[in-house]
Amino acid sequence: MRTVKAASYGYLAPEFIYRNELTTKSDVYSFGVLLLEIISGRRPAQSVESVGWQTIFEWATPLVQSHRYLDLLDPHIQELPDVGVVQKVVDLVYSCTQHVPSVRPRMSHVVHQLQQLEMKSAASEQQLRSGTSTSATSPMLPLEVRTPR
């Protein structure tokens, strides 16, 4: 039996590109790329007039380094989420896309982190609706992750 590996360039983990090696940590890397694609509305690699091709990380890293997290968001997002939520999602993206596979989290940890963010967001929204919150908070990123039960 022959296994066929199929992937798009922007989602490929470094260990696959350089050593043709696939593991569950390769999937975590690809998910990190996908997560950044979802929040930014950008493709993993795009043609940029001034530089030719630019990866999503070449575009995002300067924004992250200067703590401009809200500038990472897809311009079509109408309600801006709290910058702390965006920062936590971006931190998760960068942990998923570490160059060394053993440093990347397990996918179960990634799912747990996203569920925690979702629960905090739901609690904040409930407080806003019930009027028990003393400070205004912004909504969570419009991100929904379904896990198998």
Image (cartoon, helix red, strand yellow):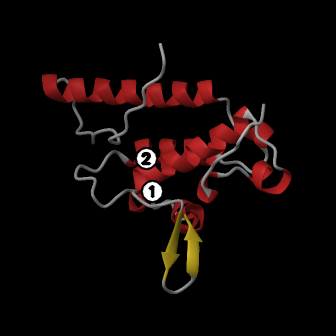
Image mark for residue 69 = 1
Judged left or right of residue 82, residue 96 is right
In the image, residue 56 sits, relative to residue 80, either above or below, namely below
Image mark for residue 86 = 2
Give the percent coordinates (x, y) of residue 89.
49, 43
Give the percent coordinates (x, y) of residue 95.
64, 43
> What residue is shown at x 50% (from left), y 51% (from top)?
36
Tag 1, which secondary structure?
helix
Q: Amino acid at mark 1?
A: Tyr
Image mark for residue 112 = none
> What residue is shown at x 33% (from left), y 38% (from top)?
140
The answer to whether marks 1 and 2 mark residues whose Cβ atoms lie closer than 8 Å is yes
Q: CA distance from mark 1 to mark 2?
A: 6 Å
> What residue is shown at x 77% (from left), y 49% (from top)?
16
Mark earlier in primary sequence (1, 2): 1
Q: Determine which quarter of the picture holds residue 126.
A: top left
